[in-house]
Amino acid sequence: MEVREKAKIVITVASLVAVTVLFVTEYRRRRHRRKKTSHLSSCYLHSELKPQFGFKRVLADNSYSEFKHLKLDDASSSLEKASNCHPYEAEITVLLENIQIEFGFLRGECSLEMSDSYVWVERESQLKELAEILAKEKVFAVDTEQHSFRSFLGFTALIQISTHEEDFLVDTIALHDAMNILRPVFSDPNICKVFHGADNDVLWLQRDFHIYVVNMFDTAKACEVLSKPQRSLAYLLEAVCGVATNKSLQREDWRQRPLSKEMVQYARTDAHYLLYIADTLTAELIQLATEDSSSPDDKFHFLLEASRRSNMTCLQLYTKETEDFPGSAVASSIIYRHLNGHGDNSTISVNSEFQELVRKLCAWRDLMARIHDESTRYVLSDQAIVSLACKQPTKTEEIYDTIAHTDLASESSPSFIRSSVQSPYPVICSHLDDIYQMILNKLAKLDEILPVVLKNCLGTNGTCPISVFNYSLLVNFKTKLSSRSAPKKNGHKNFKQFTRLASRELFVKKFSCKAPVYHNCRIYANDGRLLCYCDKRKLEWYLNRGLAKLVEENPPAIMLLFEPKGRPEDEGNDFYIQTKKNICVGCGEGKHYLRYRIIPSCYRVHFPEHLKTHRSHDIVLLCVDCHEVAHAAAERYKKQIATEFGIPLFVRRVLDSKEAQGTSSSMEDESMINSEDAGVSPLHLRSAAMALLRHGNRMPSSRREELLQIVKMYYGGRDICDEDLERALLIGLSPHERRKLERKKGVSLKNSAEATRMDKQENGKKDNDSLYIHNPDASLDENNDEEAPANCAKIMNVERITVTDDSGDGGTSEGDGATELNDTQCNGNMLHQQNSKLSLLGHGPHGKQIVEYLLREYGEDGVRDFCQRWRKVFVDAVHPRHLPGGWNVSHSGRRDFGEFSVYNPTKRLSTE
């Protein structure tokens, strides 16, 4: 016996030693691997492609700005409503107040059988087909699966939808940017959506897709009314359907593709049986009402109460959580829990260094989670924060060991994370030095630390990639510091100044002019008199055609070999014979500048040639800050112009000019189309044409006919062919947008190349001449591009930045502002002309009508007065101190065309 006992002891000790050795080996392996990566200068996101980084647009980013809810475009929406009210509040209110509501799912046809077949929806065409199927249903069941561990706010990774006939699994990662296709069916009050415990689902759908649920039956609310012993879906599945489900799968990584068989089964189960459960519960509610009611009028009392509670859930609105300071609420919770765990230990409770370090680590963790789009748990666990604050290690290796040991002991992460990545997680490994600096520099304050962290990560030479999730952090990093002490207020001010500066640096780097605008080259007349200053390109034009000879090389100067038509002094203005500095005319900034058009391009492009061609008087250089001020003033004044003349800024409808002239002989021009029924929205027209070209043969006949009617409205009601559809795709698009459309896969644009060629033939002379071929008249000046490339100076509101075509007189430019056609901002209808200069996406049609009105009523004097008004707006807004000599508000702008001018009327007639 003694031998056996000794053998058991030896075996036990040996086992313990083996386990200890394995534990230490694994720990050292992790430590060694992390030490290697901790010294990397770049962020781990450069090598790890997260699924959500494929999203082109997110409605809820990781900034501190509040969430913006959907705004309906219908004219019935009240302007007095709050900016973030529920867009379907009226429809839900009707459902809450209407006691005669009918429940479409009371069919008694639900089956417990679940076949092996289901539909995996991962393409946009499939999603549209699903929307058409659901639009014909009276009821369908919905459930969602979320992923939150590798995302700061979390995102919907899968939506399960079940009808009486079929189950659909919607891959919302692949279809994230197209999920608005399902918005109409979810907001349709005539279709009942069955959820279970929809409080979170409703908010998640709003957050990710602007999908709002209207008319819902929540089986969890039905359980409340029925006083069920449990209200979980697992309970209902087992009690009502006899189906067992593994709820631990809910914590699996729903980002993975393809999903495992177990995950697919779990996802289908949650939605498939909901219709049967809803049918059963509504029957119980009706039965309960019948048994307990004293009169027939009370029969549906319990059912209506369940419905009322369900639709009350629909009125919820998603909001971002706000804090006084990043991570402040979590820090207070960690400190409170830690102090409670130590009972009456006074040394802990009075340890201010411990509490301050906890707050620093929580604030840093919050910011890093937002930058990398990770959950705070993935960045640094609460337990690790407490350990670091208690031990306060002074070496990076000790910091790493503390975090690794703490997380290894707790292992609170999901199983799929523990099996793939061990703590410390990549965020810590990439930014371990930040924690080291916070612990080492105990006197540093949060409002000093966070700007440095943000700059190191997302600054001009930051280590972390900028994404749709973190860009707004840099643009508008808002923190609400406590107002109790003055230093915190000052810190908040410094923080805002830093983030604005960082955003400004990014904008300047991308959009400012990359080379000097003014070369200050000179052109002399054949009698030696100075005619103007210009750039090198203009000199080359004259020299290559033998119209001038080079007289000086540094700086270059030429003498014309012919007698120019005009002289600067003939105009009584020496503006064109003054050297110009490459600085902001407002404040004198010389490191960066952008071209700014004092008279917005939407007006100037329609001026007579002799009032605009090669006239750079109203094109100046501004820095980013002055450009923002000038642009804001110009946008305000545009609205005044629109009100004064009664000509709206945006086009609402378009109609093919040929068809309109054929149907209305009395129609003299496009401005006469005032009927609300005439034409069609350009956006609706292009959407309908695209759908018909792609899926016309597979569409239900009713839907195809509906889209055909939209396109026919543009063509005056006549029958259309495929060529008409292809031409409709181009309505309102600039040449840049046409090229972008051509690059899209699966779109056949036979007429696109031809349309582009025709546009070039129509506008090429005008554009190319203003950009490259310069009039040899004496009054030509340096800034010879009547319209400089538009991408040199975009509007300052980054949410409305547009990339336009580089054509000289593009209809959309700095001054135009709008990037999308707003179908609800005006009632103006326009005939569409095939002219890239009259883009429907900007204010081109508005500008064209304004200029035509001025010329018709006041002639060229009206245009000159109009220009002077705009110069006055510019001067009042910017207060320029560095304008070139000779610049003045009353500049006439008139000029004559010489013998060699491409704008000479006789020369143009001879070439046509």
Image (cartoon, rainbow, N blue to C red):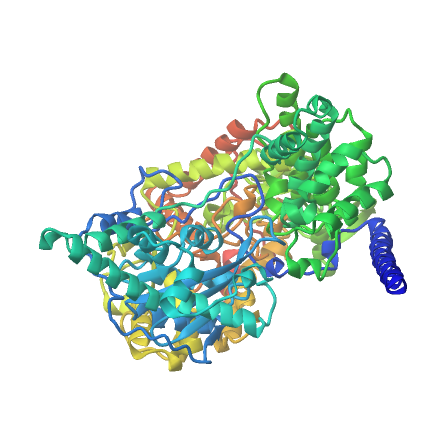
In the rendered view, would you say 675 is above or below 455?
below
- Residue 490 image-quadrant placement: top right
Q: Tell me, yes or no, if residue 580 can be seen here.
A: no
In the rendered view, would you say 650 is above or below 890?
below
Q: Tell me, yes or no, if residue 822 can be seen here.
A: yes
- Residue 241 image-quadrant placement: bottom left
In the rendered view, would you say 754 is above or below 10?
below
Residue displayed at 60% across by 28% down:
880
Q: Position of residue 658 (x, y in %)?
A: 33, 69
Along the viewing direction, whichever of 423 and 301 lies nearer the viewer: 301
List the single residue furthest toward the front: 1
List the single residue furthest toward the bottom: 697
Answer with left or right where residue 302 lies relative to residue 258: left
Q: Position of residue 64 (x, y in %)?
A: 56, 39
Along the viewing direction, whichever of 540 and 738 lies nearer the viewer: 738
Along the viewing direction, whichever of 417 and 437 lies nearer the viewer: 417
Q: Position of residue 827 (x, y in %)?
A: 30, 50
Q: In the rendered image, which quarter contains the N terminus?
A: bottom right
Residue displayed at 52% across by 54% down:
810
Q: Position of residue 840 (x, y in %)?
A: 43, 56
Looking at the image, how many numbered discs can be counted on the residues? 0
Answer with left or right where residue 172 lies relative to residue 449: left
